[in-house]
Structure formats: C-alpha cells, structure tokens
Image (cartoon, rainbow, N blue to C red):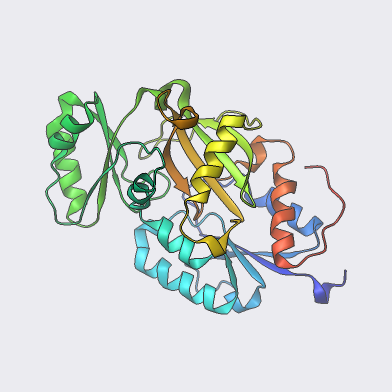
Amino acid sequence: MTAACRPRVGLATTRPLPEPDPDEFPLVAALEREGCSVRLLPWRDSAAPSPEDFDLVVLRSTWDYSRAGEAFRAWLVRVAAATRLLNPLPVVEWNLHKRYLLELGAAGVPVVPTRLRRRGESAAVGAAWDEFGAESIVVKPAVSAASRDTRRFDRSELEAADAFAAALLRKEDVLLQPFLPAFADPGERAVVCFDGRPHHVVVKRPRFADDAESVGTGRPPTAAESAFAAEVLARVPFESARPLLYARVDAVADSEAPYGLRLSELELVEPSLFLTHQPGAVSRFARAVAARAGAAVLPEQSP
C-alpha cells in the first residue's frame, strides 16, 4: 500500500490529558500495522490538525469535554461536517447527557434506579433516598467524564449530600442513584464491544471524584453478559448507525434482573476500552477501525 492511498485516521484526544491513556500508543502502533496513517487530534488545541486532514476521526480520550460542553459540541459538529466521525454525531449527542438512562429504562432495559434533577431545581436528595431505600446515594453531573464531581454519601450525610447536589444544580443537571452493594462486591462489569459485538470484560471498582481507576484483568464475556450487552445496544435509537464501532456496557449484578445484570452506564462517546487488559483486543479494535477507514485488512498481527 503506498503512502498516498493510506487511510488517514485521527484519534481525538485532549492535551494535557487529565490522566494517562494506556491505550493510546498501542492503538496507534496497531493502526499503523493495519496500513493506516495515524495522527492524534487534540480537540482543544488550536494548532492541532484540521478535521479535513482525515478520512476518519475516532473519539478516544477527550476526557475534559464535560468542562466545556458547548465548545465540545461545536467541535463535534465541525468534525462531522468535514469527515466521518465515529461514533456518529447523533449517537454521541444522545449519549453525552445521561438522561439516556431514563430513556433506556423506559424502553425496557433494566437500569440502576436513576432520578434526574434539572438545573435550577431543588436537590431533594432525601426524597430520592427514601424512594431508593438505599443506605448510600451517588450524586453526579448528568454530563460528566472521568468521574468529575461524582460523590457517594451515606445516610448520616444527608445534609452534605443536599448541599453538594444543590451546588451542582446551580450550573448543570444532576443524577441521583443508589449505591448498590454489587458496585463494591463483586464490582462493576464493563463489557467492551467492537462492531456491535462483545469482545472482553473487565471488572472495575467504584470510582469517585479524584479517585484512581481500579480495573482487573480482562476475560471473555459470559453468555449472559454478551446477551445483555446485545440487548442494550439494540435499544440505542439510531438503527442506521449500527453496528457501532465501539461501545462499553457497564453493569452490576442483580439476580432479579434479566441476565442477572442491571445497566449502570452505556459509554458511546470516549470510554476507555481497556485494550491492554485483554490479549488481542488492540489488534481487533485496530482492524475494526481500519476497515471503517477503508484500509485493506492485513493478516492478523500479534497484539
């Protein structure tokens, strides 16, 4: 393949990164092995390459977007108008605000109980607490990444929880959710999907603002995890965008829910895909990206 016909792939990121991205350099190398010309595209950098310079832009580590939401949306629109954006713009816009949990719940997906408070509304954390019947509650922005401003409160901290939620509500929408015991033991399962198909699973420990992420080793998904992830992705309301290049279906165990799982988040914008946690994941994802970019698929490489 000559340099002139190599598909040009941009990996959207930010600089400086709020935390390291262990997937970045392995993915760049794997894409180059697949015949792609790869460059990083920091979304907030005025000196970054133009979206027009790429045949495909893949959202990866734009982990500061929630601090500049309107600017990020404008950038997304610009990229989508200039080249192919993945995941597609309508999917990303839908997934940016966690109201999608309420929509998926209404569509029949078993979701962690969620209450949405709109900007300027009363926090009413106590009312949600009573409704959930939980010992602990999680308060977080409805548009957030990297656990920004996400905190857990126990029943004895109701006054602090109310004050924290009220402070957030002065500037943005807020979600209230019970902290289910399964988040801590056995942990939250992240089912990573490529081209709409579950590929591997990692188990994560609860993460709140300023916490480091604690992630176990990867493993193949169980039949129940695969079926659950497929069911969730089938409810994403953009049929023409399927199969999605990437998705991360985060869930916790619940013996009373279908498949024994309950959705905590569906990550379609910029999730960590834990590519270095599962053998073959980097190469598999690189092949999926290369195929979308129009690259000739080369023989399988070792991860």
Which residue is depicted at the point 60% across and 45% down?
193
Residue 150 pos. (x, y %): 32, 41
Can you name the residue that lies furthest to the top here? 185
In the rendered image, the vertical position of residue 86 relative to residue 101, given as above or below: below
Which residue is depicted at the point 14% across and 31% down?
158
Residue in the foreground of this view, choosing between 249 and 271: 249
Which residue is depicted at the point 24% across and 26% down?
134
Specify whether 211 is left or right of 3: left
Residue 30 pos. (x, y %): 75, 52
How many marks the image carries: the answer is: 0
In the rendered image, the vertical position of residue 37 relative to residue 246, given as above or below: below
Specify whether 27 is left or right of 119: right
Residue in the foreground of this view, choosing between 227 and 150: 227
- Quarter occupied by residue 138: top left
Q: Quadrant of the C terminus?
A: top right
Specify whether 85 is left or right of 167: right
Q: In the rendered image, is residue 191 in sight?
A: yes
Residue 213 pos. (x, y %): 48, 35
Q: In the rendered image, is residue 50 in sight?
A: no
Specify whether 222 is left or right of 66: right
In the rendered image, the vertical position of residue 51 relative to residue 117, given as above or below: below
Residue in the foreground of this view, choosing between 260 and 31: 260
Residue 186 pos. (x, y %): 47, 21
Q: Quadrant of the N terminus?
A: bottom right
